[in-house]
Amino acid sequence: GQNFYPQALEEMLLQTNSVGEACVSCRSNALTGSTVIATIVKSGVISNTDCENEIKKHLLNVAPKYMRPSKYIFANDLQVTLRMKKKR
């Protein structure tokens, strides 16, 4: 398999205009072994569909296929631990 560093993908997501905050995690998947999930807090007023399309277009140019999220979750804010680290 490939090494996967969520922070690297989060930095790529933040390069788009529509993403204010991002948290990336991996979940087990019976077919592929793991699935990449991105939780997104949008910046500004944009629909979830338009935001997801902008992200996908951007990641096609900057991220290898194995790093691209297969699922996007849109949230109002990110959950953090008591030490202010992102909950993955």
Image (cartoon, rainbow, N blue to C red):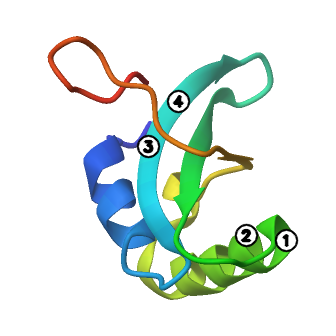
Label 3: few (<14), some (14–19) or many (≥20) C-alpha neighbours in 10 Å: many
Relative to 56, say whether 66 is above or below.
above
Q: Left or right: 78 with respect to 36?
A: left
**Where 60 falls versus 19 (above or below)?**
below
Gap in angstroms between the C-alphas marked 2 and 1: 5 Å
Using the rendered view, name the quadrant where residue 45 is placed.
bottom right
Check whether the beta carbons of the residues at disc 4 and disc 1 lie within 8 A of each other: no
Q: CA distance from mark 4 to mark 2?
A: 18 Å
Front-lying residue, 49 or 44: 44
The quadrant of the rendering that contains the N terminus is: top left
Marks 4/2 in contact by CB < 8 Å: the verdict is: no
Residue carrying label 4 = 26
Identity of the residue drawn at 54% across and 55% down: 41
Is disc 2 placed on a helix, strand or loop? helix
Depicted 28 relative to depicted 63: above or below: above
Residue behind mark 1: 49
Give residue 75's quadrant in the image. top right
Tell me the amino acid under the disc marked 1.
Answer: Thr
**Type of the residue with mark 2:** Glu
Q: Is residue 48 above or below residue 21?
A: below
> Mark 4 and mark 1: span between their CA atoms?
22 Å
